[in-house]
Amino acid sequence: MSGERKKVEIAGITVEWDLDEGKNLWAGSPALSMWIGSTVAGMMSSVQRMVGTERFNLSLQSGGRDSIRDDWAVIERAPTFEEGFAALGAIAAAAGWGRWHIAALDRAAREARFRVVNSWEGMYQNALGVCWGSSMLAGKFAGYCGKLFGVNCWAEQTSFIARGEAYDEFVVRPSETTIEEQLEALFESSKATSADLAVALAKLRQEVEERQQVETELREKLALIHRQEEAMRAMSTPIITIWDGVLTLPVVGSLDSGRASSMMEQLLAEIVRSRSRFAILDLTGVDMVDTATADHLLKIMRAVELLGARCVVTGIRPGVAQTMVSLGVDLASISTLRNLQEGLKACMRWIEKERVKRD
């Protein structure tokens, strides 16, 4: 019948079926009913085969502990833990989780013992003929005691329906080791399963991809730095053609071996490329020189002349001239002029003389 909805009150909870939408609602939240001996058994056995029994149990216990928020809301509404647990147990029984009760509770010793008759975990394992333990229930009881005692707790199962016993029983005590730490220890041990290895491989692939991305970014940054350095070198070594066959290289600031080597390399390459006959080394921007700077300048001048070009030095300041003399720098074979304009004029005269001789 269209629009048909069924409601019933069970253990203080409104259970509703919306047949048109295919929903079962418990207290307004969607719920699910499954056949324990077939559907649940098939689902759980598939997961166990994939990850192994120990990891399977730890994961279920972790899931049980993490699922107690709504459970605890029921418990804390009651005056005592025992009364709240009884109310929750009624709901659990109505939902097919078995009949729960507290066998013992010692707040001073922070220890509790729970029993579950007809637990769904015990029943599906009976159907499969295995005994893996009721780990999700264990996680829930450990979570309740963690809230009650205010410490991390661990549940140890001491009786098993899957072994033919009358109930599942759990002893809960404080524990210094968390479920997450046990999972991590299991992953690092030889008990790791193929699923663990798959996770490790996926993590490794992710790390490799991240490392490759970082390397790509570093290469791009290094390339940018290299381009910036090249641009800075070009700016610091501006070789200018100021006349046909005449180059000028303005030198500004200090001159170390690296910069001198770069200047020489670029100047010599440009002389060869342009077939220039003259290179003016303009020192107007040099305020002071030392022995190393003077030696670098002389090497540049001699290298120019070894290519068959004539080197002209212009713009030597008085302080620089005094220093070079005191350092014993021999500039006798080098043409030196007052400024760049005079240097260019001299080069133009020499070019004209060479033209006249050829004619």
Image (cartoon, rainbow, N blue to C red):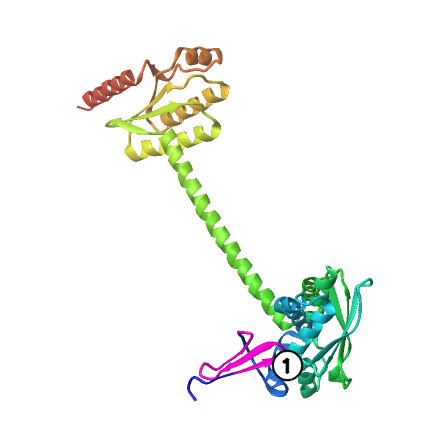
Q: Position of residue 89 (x, y in %)?
A: 68, 76
Return the residue at label 1.
94
233 relative to 168 in the view: left or right: left
245 relative to 43 in the view: left or right? left
Q: Is residue 258 left or right of residue 240?
A: right
| Whether residue 96 can be seen here | no
Span of residues in magenta: 7-28
For this orientation, the residue located farthest to the bottom is 1
Label the magenta part by its dominant secondary structure: strand
* Front one among 13 and 172: 13
Residue 347 part of the magenta segment: no
Neighbours of disc 1 within 10 Å: few (<14), some (14-19), many (20+): some
| Outermost residue, left side | 359
Quadrant of the image occupied by residue 116: bottom right
Quarter in which the C terminus is drawn:
top left
What residue is shown at x 35% (from left), y 34% (from top)?
Answer: 269
Is 320 drawn above or below residue 265 in the view shown? above
Q: Is residue 232 visible?
A: yes
Q: Position of residue 104 (x, y in %)?
A: 80, 72
Whether the magenta-drawn stretch holds residue 16 is answered as: yes
Relative depth, front residue between 65 and 237: 65
Q: Quadrant of the N terminus?
A: bottom left
Q: What residue lies at 68% left-to-right and 70% top-to-bottom?
A: 140
Percent coordinates x, y for residue 87 in the rendering: 68, 74
Q: Residue 252 is drawn in which quadrant?
A: top left
Figure disc tally: 1
Residue 138 placement (x, y as % from top left):
71, 72
Task: Say if 176 sits above or below 315 in the image.
Answer: below
Q: Classify residue 348 by image quadrant.
A: top left
> What's under tag 1, amino acid-wise?
Ala
Q: Disc 1 on helix, strand or loop? A: helix
Q: What residue is rendered at 54% in x and 62% in y?
A: 205
